[in-house]
Image (cartoon, coloured by chain):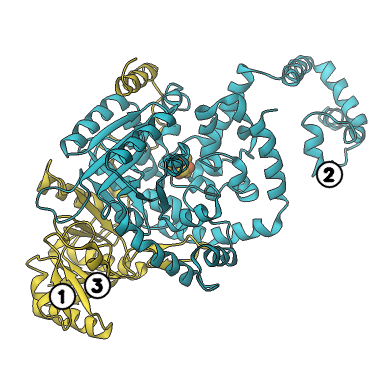
Chain colours: A yellow, B cyan
Amino acid sequence: MADARSDILARIREALTVKAPKPHFKAEATAGQPVKVAKPWLPDGGETLDASLLILAEQLAKLKAVLIRVPDEAAAGQAVADLARAKAWKQVAYHGAPLVRPVAAALPCASWEADASFEKQKLEGCDASITSCESIVAQLGSILVSSASSGGRALSILPHVHVVVARVDQVVPDLATALAQLQAEHGAQMPSMLSFITGPSRTGDIERILVLGAHGPKELYLVLVG
Amino acid sequence: MSDAKQIFIKDATLNAADGDQRAFIRKALGGYYVNRDLQKARYRDWERARDAASLAKWTAVNDLANQLEKFTANFERNGGIVHWARDSAEARAIILKIAADVNAKAIVKSKCMTSEEIHLNDALEKAGYGVVESDLGEFIQQLRGEPPYHFVFPCMHVKREAISELFTKHLGTAPTDSPEELTMIARRHLRQLYVDADIGITGANFLVAETGQISITENEGNARLTAALPRIHIALSGIEKVVNRLDDLAVLLPMLATAGAGQPMTCYNTLYAGPRKPGECDGPEQFHLVLLDNARTRLLADPEQRDALHCIRCGACLNVCPIFKNIGGLAYGTTYQGPIGSVITPHLRGLKQWNHLSSASSLCGACTDACPVRIDLHHHLLHNRRNAMKQSPSLFDRVFHAGFGFVMKRPALFALGGKVFLATLPLLKKLPLPYMSAWLKTRDLPVAPPKSFRDQWKDSAHG
Ligand code: SF4
C-alpha cells in the first residue's frame, strides 16, 4: 500500500484533471496576487502617517485598547509607572528590548526580564507584561508581536495586562504593508510565532455578550513614543 | 428513509416549535448584524474584496497538490513534522502515537472543528488521557456532553442560568447570572491547565505555502496559550486550508472576522513557523501538523462544487440562514452546521444518507450573499438534489417527474389537469400524499379562485 502522503497527492492530482470554472469576477483581478488589486477595496489605513495615526486611534478606542501618546522615552517610563501605581501592580515581567528596558527600570514595583527561560508558574502570577512589537497596523488597530520582538510566546498572552511600547514610525497603514515588511525583514527565517493582536482578549460565547479578558490579557495598552 | 434523515426531521420539528429558543437565538445574533454592517461599511468596496478573497482560495485549491508540497517542504524547513492522514482513523492513530511517544498525560485543546470531525476527544479519553477544551464555548459544550451548536459560536444556544448551574455542578462555584463572572470562572479554572498540560492541540485556519507557516484565528487567547506553554504542539488541519502567499492573508483575515463575527479583525491572528527556535525563550519542543483528507478529495473531484473547499469557516452563512435560526445547529447532526454543512456533508459522509439536508433550505440565497469567498452555496444544494436524483431516485420521484414531464408537454392535458386539481384541492389536504401532507400539516391551503388563470385570460379582453 502506498503511503498516505503519495496517496493523497495522487488523489488530488487525479481530481484536478477536470478543471473548475474560473470564479465569475466583477473585477479583472490579477491571478496570483489578489491582494495587490484588493488594496483599494479594503478598509482605509491612511495615506500619510498623520492620517494613519488618526485611524489607529479610532480603531483602538473601538477595540477598548488604550492608546497613550508620549513625546519621549522618559515620558513613556513615567506613563507606565503611573499605570503601575494606579493599578497596584506587584510583579511585572518584560522583554529586554532597548525601548522597553528603560520603561521597566522606572517601574515602582518588582520586575524581571523574561528573555531567558523562565518558570511558567512565575509568569502566570504576574500582573502585567511589557513588550515591544514588530509593527502596528492602523487600518485594523492590530499590533504585530513576535517571539523575537516580544520575548517569546507566552509573555504577551499570559499576564493579565499587556503593555506594548513602540515608536510612532512603527505604525504602518495596512495589513498588506505589515506582511510585506515582515517578509523583507525576516525572509525565510520567520520568528516561530507572529501574532496580530487586535484589542484585549475577548469572548462572546455566553449569549453573544462581549466580555473582555477571556484567557489572554484583560487590558491592552499601547504606549507610542514620538 | 435514512436514519440521519429521520433524526433530522424529528429534531428539526421539535426545535422549530420552540418559539422561546428561536427568539433567544435571534436576539443573540442581533448584535452581530449591527456590527457586521458597521465593519462592512469600512470596506471601500466589499463586493470586489470578496472577488479577491475568492480568487485567493480558488488559486490555491486548483493547484492544491503543488501548493501542499511547497507548504510541507517549507513547514519542515521551519523544523515542524508533517503527518498525512487519509481518513479519521489514520488521523486519530497518528495523534495517539505522538501522545504515547512523548509520554503525555494531560492535553489541552483550543477550538478545532476538524478534531470534532474525527472524534478525537473520545479516542484520547478512551486511551486514558485527560483532555480539556479551552475555548470557553467548547469548554461549556464539553461539560454539557454536547457537540458544538455553531462552529464559530459553539454554545450560543445556552442561557447563562444553565451555564451557571453547569459550573456549580462541575467546578463547585457559586451561582451567578453575570456573563462576565462566568467567563472569569472559566478563566481561573483553565489557566492552570495550560501550565500543566504536556500537549497542546490546535486547528489551523490557513496553511501558507510560500512560508510554511500556519495561521490560527481566535478571540480568547486560548489557542495562543495552547501553542505557547505545553511542550508539544499538534495542529490538525484539512488539506484544503492552503493559501499560496503570505499576503493573501491581508484580504482573508479581515474578511473572515468581518463576515463571521462583525469584527475588524479577530483578536489574535497568529502565524506559527516551527517549534521553539534556538535563541527563543519559550515555545514547544516539537510542532506536529496532521494533514487530513477524509473525503475532501472527493469534493475536489467535483468541479461544479469544488469551490465549497474555499470555505474559511467564518460562520456567516449560518448567521443569516433562516433554517439554521429556526431548527438550531444541533438538529443538523453534522460537524459543520448550516448551509456549508448541508453542502459538504453529503460529500464527506455520503449523498444517500445526507441528501435530506439539501432540502433544509428555503433557497433564499442569503448564505451565498453572505459568503466572503463567494461559494455558490444555495446552488450547490440544488446540485446535490439533482445528483441524488440521478444516483438513486425514489419510486415516487421517478413516477412524479415522469408524470409531470408528460403533462407539461401536452397543453390540453395540462388544462384538464388544472381543472381536476382545482376541483379536488380541498380533498388533497386529507389524503396522505408524499410531500404534500407534510407541507400542509403546518400550512393552510389558499382558497382557490373559481377559474384557472388560463380561463380568466381567455375570458378577458386579451383572449
Ligand atoms: S461557506 Fe462561506 S459563509 Fe459559510 S462558513 Fe464558509 S466561508 Fe463562511
Separation of residues labelled 3 and 1 (CA atoms): 10 Å
Query: Mark 3 or mark 1, which has the lower sequence index?
Result: 1
Location of residue B252 (image quadrant): top left
Considering depth in this image, is B160 or B431 the residue closer to the camera? B160
Residue B70 in percent (x, y) is at: 22, 30
Residue B45 is at least partly visible in this image: no
Question: Could you give the CA–CA distance between mark 2 and mark 3, rounded to whole angstroms?
Answer: 64 Å
Callout 1 amino acid:
Ser
Seen at 24% across and 46% down, the residue is B272
Seen in the image, is A181 located left or right of residue B439? left
Q: Which of marks 2 and 1 is in front?
A: 1
Foreground tag (2 vs 3)? 3
Please, what is the three-letter code of the amino acid marked with disc 2?
Asp
- Using residue B231 as the reference point, say whether residue A107 is left or right of it: left
Of B209 and B5, nearer the camera is B5
Give the crowd class for mark 3: few <14, some 14-19, many >=20 residues within 10 Å: many
Does B293 sit above or below residue B121? Answer: above
**Image quarter for residue B458?**
top right
Q: Where's the C terminus of chain A, which quadrant?
A: bottom left
Q: In the rendered image, which residue does mark 1 sit on?
A: A111
Asked whether mark 2 lies closer than 8 Å to ligand 1, one says: no
Q: What residue type is labelled 3?
A: Ala
CA gap between label 2 and label 1 equals 73 Å
Residue at x 59% of width, y 63% of height: B162
Label 3 close to label 1 by CB (< 8 Å): no
**Residue at numbered disc 3:** A128
Residue drawn at 26 percent across, 33 percent down: B82
Write down the residue under mark 2. B444
